Amino acid sequence: MDLAELTGVRVARTTDDLVLRPGEAWLGGGSWLYSTPQPHLTGLVDLTGMGWAPTARDDDGALRIAGTCTVAELVAAAATWPAADPATASAAALVRRCADAFLMSSKVWSVATVGGNLCLGLPAGAMITLTAALDGVADLWSPDRGARAVPVVDLVTGPGRTDRAGDELLRGVDVPAAALTARYASRQLALTPVGRSSALVVGRLDADGACTLVVTAATTRPLRLRFPALPGAAEVTDALAGVTTWYDDPHGPADWRAGITPVLAAEVLAELAVTTSSEEVAA
């Protein structure tokens, strides 16, 4: 879609260029920005000129995902993790599964960015699911207040709402090294075979035996449940019984989502339990 009201696009190359002028917005990939009218905008600030590396690994193994990293770039980077470190194979597979959960073509993969998906704050945002499951922390920057770190699970506050202020730029997401060596399992459900996610549950089993479950799409904001060890299905069902943030939209009513999520969670736990048993036998 053409943005007829635009009078100019400038490319940001320094921090000073990131300061928005009246009527401007940041441009990452533009997959959403150009998909709907934006009559309030008169200018765009192209972030690709900042030259941020799509992904980078620290010496301790932590991962930095740039806000401008596209879905395609993240999938390509994750595909190299098992070769470099076999323990990251499960995290790499999770990246691909979350990318596949997008209701988009491969062409959109090449432009849609991780930062854009997080800032939209939509319940079915697959990069929200991924980075929340990886214990990602969003790096937000404001020209007036500087930088602050917000866990992704707290960044999204409701459908289309985030904790990001209007003048704050999401520069990247930091993922701890431990999250990349955990074991993952996931289940997704939609009303149609290629439809938008109605529920997406990711289970994570850390090296110390701790377990995390992340629920998205079925809830208005990311839901994270932590357990000291792999829980039973009944324990998770009890924990979910107190949830009040079930989402209701054309992709599924709230009561149905509340009913299917414990079923998906039980399947995730069963898969993690099999993985654990197989490792113990191998040992």
Image: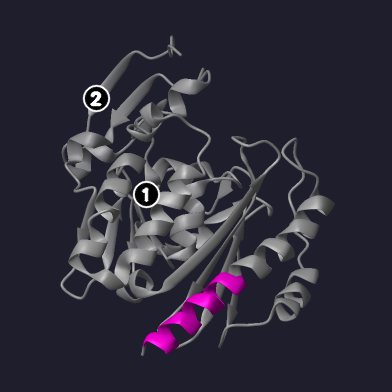
Q: Position of residue 277 (x, y in %)?
A: 50, 84
As rendered, which of 56 and 203 lies closer to the eye? 203
Left or right position of 92 against 38: left
How packed is label 2: few (under 14 Cα within 10 Å), some, or many (20 or more)?
some
Q: Main secondary structure of the magenta part?
A: helix
As rendered, which of 96 and 129 lies closer to the eye? 96
Q: Quadrant of the C terminus?
A: bottom left
The magenta stretch spans residue 273:
yes
- Please tell me how many numbered marks the rendered image carries: 2
Residue drawn at x 61%, y 38% is 196
The magenta stretch spans residue 38:
no
As rendered, which of 36 and 203 lies closer to the eye? 203
Q: Callout 1: helix, strand or loop?
A: strand
Tell me if residue 30 can be seen.
no
Left or right position of 88 against 31: left
Query: Farthest right residue?
Result: 255
Q: Position of residue 28 (x, y in %)?
A: 33, 35
Q: Which residue is mark 2?
A: 10
Q: Is residue 219 above or below residue 110?
A: below
Q: Which residue is mark 1?
A: 170
Q: Position of residue 56 (x, y in %)?
A: 20, 58
Residue drawn at x 76%, y 43% is 252
Q: Callout 2: helix, strand or loop?
A: strand
Q: Which residues are magenta?
A: 269-282
Amino acid, disc 2: Arg
Q: Earlier in the sequence, mark 1 or mark 2?
A: 2
Q: Position of residue 67 (x, y in %)?
A: 33, 47
Query: Farthest front residue?
Result: 281
The answer for how far apart the CA atoms under marks 1 and 2 are is 18 Å
